[in-house]
Image (cartoon, rainbow, N blue to C red):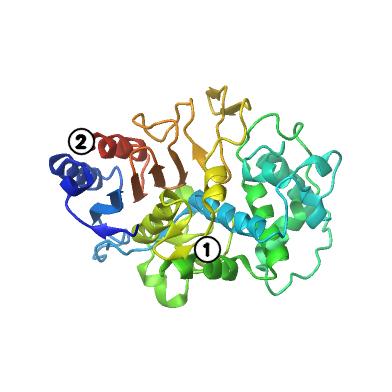
Amino acid sequence: MKLTFGRPEEAGMSADRIRHLEKVVAGWVENKAAPAAAMLVARNGVIVSHEAFGPLTPEPGSPALAKDSIFPLASLSKPVTATCMMTLVEDGLLELTDSVSKYIPEFIGEGKDSIKIHHLLTHTAGMRDEDVHNHSLKEEERQAAIPEPEATQHPNIHKRLHRGYGAPLWKAPGTEMRYFNYGYLLLGELIRRLSGRSLHDYAAERIFEPLGMKDTFFVVPDDRFDRVVERDDQHYGGKWYSSPDKMRLPSAAGGLYSTVMDLAIYGQMFLNKGVYGDTRILSPLTVGEMVSNQIPGVPAARNDEVYVEASWGYGWNVRGPKRDDSGSLRTARAFDHGGAGGVRLLVEPEYGVLWVYLSIESTKLYTRNLFNNVVMSAITV
């Protein structure tokens, strides 16, 4: 099944509710709750809505946001990094129960040889980003020597990895989920070492180019810079992810850029159990493992919320029994991932639905969870 445009009724959805959804998003943009937003909704392979609202940049006289404008995905990069990892598993280059230190011997510290690759994928490594940050500062203060990066690694990511290799364990791996960005940088380094390719090139060759995701990059080409959404927000340090340095930083944890259409193709590939059209990226078994809860019985805490069952797959947030910020109208099989700034891709296999919502979100209203509820309310059969 490939995505095609059609009427909502063809997909078993209400045209009135889809129009209501579009009006709701347009209202968020008009009221500055989301200064800019692009969206795509599809069911059973039928695209029932594909719209964009607001300006491309905050400057006066900015061009309008286009349906193919490119957004920084922030942490929505992580499922793609996980997909790259699983292609290496399918190729027989590693096992998820292997210790991380088997492939990255610089990753040292008491008890850290018990951290397995699957712990990184599920954020259960027993490490915390704040501890990595503090350790890195100490390494910087003592001017610890850093070897020259190989040609396939970005110097800044190479530096961040090396300064964090010796960070301590927080608790035993596998006992609690704690969202761990540095863990995904480690996965990116594993991909680079095992494939012999940069993360940017490997993802393009194994995922983006075969699927026809022509506007998805870990390193944005210079000739696409003028299509990248810009957010001028001092909370994120000025231009946030739209500076040239950011657009050229291939972070496995948060460096991907894409469009709503490209992400919809990626999501449909998962709905199709690893294939899109004539192109197979993953086996059905691999997809099933990625979108299943891989940490049953493992708790998580975030801010003031405590989850008795964290429910996480390989790179994906799996709904399971928990209630989180991805919307109330979801089944237990739904899986998704979001990212800072207001982006999310959600797949609902029980109803054949996928949606992509890419916004430049303000603190006035958290719209991604509300978006999901309006989408799902449009289902009629």
**From where the camera sits, is residue 347 visible?**
yes
**Depth check, front residue: 33 or 220:** 220
Check disc 2 and report its element: helix, strand or loop.
loop
Q: Amino acid at mark 2?
A: Thr
Q: Amino acid at mark 1?
A: Lys
Q: Where does the image place residue 162, in percent across and percent down from the top left?
A: 76, 57
Residue 331 vs 355, above or below: the answer is: above
Instruction: Tell me if 2 is positioned left or right of 217 in this view.
Output: left
Residue 4 vs 150, above or below: the answer is: above
Residue drawn at point x = 63 percent, y = 57 percent: 90
- Crowding around mark 2 (Cα neighbors within 10 Å: few <14, some 14 to 19, many 20+) is few
> Which residue is farthest bottom?
223
**From where the camera sits, is residue 239 visible?**
no
- Crowding around mark 1 (Cα neighbors within 10 Å: few <14, some 14 to 19, many 20+) is some
Residue on which disc 2 sits: 380
Q: Where does the image place residue 270, in percent across and percent down from the top left?
A: 45, 51
Between circles 2 and 1, the one closer to the viewer is: 2
Check disc 1 and report its element: helix, strand or loop.
helix
Mark 2 and mark 1 residues within 8 Å of each other at the beta carbon? no
Q: Which mark is residue 246?
A: 1
Q: Which mark is residue 43?
A: none
Instruction: Tell me if 80 is positioned left or right of 190 in this view.
Output: left
Instruction: Tell me if 117 is positioned left or right of 145 in this view.
Output: left
**Depth check, front residue: 41 or 252:** 41
Q: Where does the image place residue 139, in percent across and percent down from the top left?
A: 80, 52
**Depth check, front residue: 19 or 246:** 19
**Depth check, front residue: 8 or 219:** 8
Mark 2 and mark 1: Cα distance apart in space: 43 Å
Residue drawn at point x = 24 percent, y = 34 percent: 377
Q: Where does the image place residue 343, in percent across and percent down from the top left?
A: 40, 48
Residue drawn at point x = 78 percent, y = 70 percent: 148
Q: Quadrant of the C terminus?
A: top left
